[in-house]
Amino acid sequence: MTELGTLHAPLQVEFDYTRSLGPTLSGFMTGLKRRQILGGVLSDGTVAVPPPEYDGTTFAPITELRPVADVGVVQSWAWVPEPVAGQPLDKPFAFAQIVLDGADKALLHAVAVDSAADIQTGMRVRAVWADEPVGAITDIRWFEAEGDSPATTPGPEGDAIEGIISPVKLAYDYAASPEESKFFRGLADGKLIGQRCPVCEKVYVPPRGACPVDGVPTTDEVEVADHGTITTFCIVNVPFTGQQIPIPYVSAYVLLDGADIAFLHLILGIDAADVRMGLRVKAVWKPRDEWGTTIANISHFEPTGEPDADYETYKVHL
Amino acid sequence: MTRDVAIVGFSQRQMKEFDGSPTCVELLVPIFQELWEQTGWTKTDIGFWCSGSSDYLAGRAFSFVSAVDAIGALPPVMESHVEMDAAWALYEAWVKIQTGLVDSALVYGFGKSSAGVLRRVLSLQMDPYTVTPLWADAVSLAAIQARAGLESGAFDESQMADVVARSMTDAASNDSAIRKGATTADDVLAQPLYADPLRRWDCAPVSDGASAMIITAADAPGFDKLKGNKAWITGFEHRVEPGALNSRDLKVSESTKSAGAAAGVDGVDLAELHAPFSHQELILKDALGLGDDVRINPSGGALTANPMFTAGLNRIGEAARQVWAGDSQRALAHATSGPALQQNLVLTMEARA
Ligand SMILES: [Zn+2]
């Protein structure tokens, strides 16, 4: 038999973090919205951009912010030959530590140059601003060679910036374990494949990389029924972002006949108030032409109409 | 008062791409099995379990919880997790043993870097207000650090090439290494620059892997039935530097220096240094004050395989193996975490008759 590799699928993780700002960073971000860069005055009189919230020596809060220029000198730099998603430029560029005129400690930002030969330590650079600053570090789009470009026009005074939203978008190649891969391939054939632990002989659906009792991989394949018993459940009444099913709905653990561990699915075809422990349910499969290697092949579970299972039959699986 | 604690078991897997789940449960099961064979112990001899990993690496929430399956954690075990290299999980375990709460621990780490774009994912370790929104990647930050060192004269290109050549040559006999083989400094310098001033070989390869280690107090029940040799821990410290890059002098490693001073580096004949970039080994060597008579990274080090969240523990394990084999009387191991050597840990160990 040919040994198939594990199943892979692209996975996108996205979340917009809403971050509140303390007084120091609030001042810094508010400055950026006005196209003004503010440095923090440290206890030794030096100026750091971005301003730290606390002084590194005295640990006192940084309270004095001082305007610095949006032109400065490259202190150290790195060539970025293969930019990654989200970076300030989508063609090769440099990241640099830039000491702005009036500051002592460097700001990390991008420098737009055509090649590594066009940048060196000591080079003077000028900020290129976004057309409509919002109060974020990305209001400075990048820096470029100072040249003869005109001085920056300050933006209008606006309300203080007290929070920022930092979007995080990550892309992965997600792999299932070998045992999970067999389960998902089984679903594409309309089968529910569990695997038995060789030590305790419990049948896990979906199978696991290791039996949590014995710490060994589950091995023997076992096909289990697509009907079973609700062992426990919850009624979802809380709306949340991305919710696809109208509330209230029931999410339940179903102990499939032949399995030793219950698995989670959606219960429909019955009023949420009537769902109970011991209720016998069966899988409702989507039309065959919609199947893939996914648990979504089963649309939901619904009551079979059989009498409820006796508590004794599932009490050890709770 | 300090309890005497020894490293008694170590096992690892490192690879370019692991074709399996992000929790690496499949990798951990045989690694744990090797530990039982090495030590003669079973899981009932372990008082505490601690892991190092990160959900961001593979995009799976609570990945360390799923990994616990590999232990066989029923009945329940005492377990903890750090969002750091497993070397820090080892520190937590060592402290727990020092408190007297437990007598032994199994520490493990896992990371599947190949699932995403590693240098980009690591941007999330940065200041989320002023740095992460630029997606300042880990390779660029290391390159900025390297240039600061090069242009200040702290080290030069040929020293960096020597580090690469020695690492790849030493790794030739290491089954776990990914990038390896006899290499000269001239071979290295003949490669084009990648993230100027770094060449690709100056940067650790993206690696997947898992590793695990057992440590125990000398007065632990079951100590007498332990098989194999012991590497006795003589010092263990870690230090952190400010998160803000502009608060640090990137050319030096103050945190390594103070961790090394606290752990006691005198008399070491071997050092396994966790340097994912060639110039970082030079910075670390200087911070620790290691002489040229100290053998550095005979395993090949992180430049030949750098599985995230285990590469630091691997340094400790590789150093312990040298002590077990009688090839080192007193060894130092170092682990790093965070951008441009932000956090550093130093452990010293010795052989005893
Ligand atoms: Zn079992």
Image (cartoon, coloured by chain):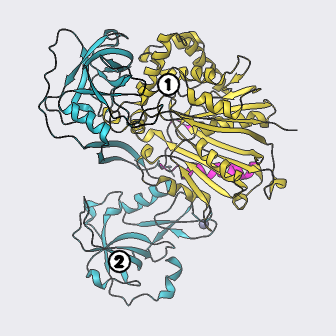
Q: Quadrant of residue A276?
A: bottom left
The residue stretch that appears in magenta: B15-38
- Taking the spot 50% from the left edge, 49% from the top edge, the residue there is A2
Q: Chain of mark 1?
A: B
* Apparent side of residue B203 relative to residue A38 in the rendered image (left or right): right
In yellow, which chain? B
Q: Quadrant of residue A89?
A: top left
* Apparent side of residue B150 relative to residue A51 in the rendered image (left or right): right
The x and y percentages for residue B326 are 82, 33
Residue B97 appearing in the image: yes
Q: Residues within 10 Å of mark 2 (few under 14, many from 20)?
A: many
Q: Quadrant of residue B156?
A: top right
* Apparent side of residue A174 relative to residue B299 in the rendered image (left or right): left
In front here: B42 or B2?
B2
Chain A representation colour: cyan
Q: Indicate the secondary structure of the residue bearing disc 2.
A: strand
How many numbered circles does the render carry? 2
Name the residue type under label 1.
Cys
Q: Indicate the secondary structure of the residue bearing disc 1.
A: loop
**Which residue is labeled 2 in the image?**
A282
The x and y percentages for residue B140 are 41, 25
- Taking the spot 49% from the left edge, 73% from the top edge, the residue there is A259
The x and y percentages for residue B240 are 53, 36
Name the residue type under label 2.
Lys
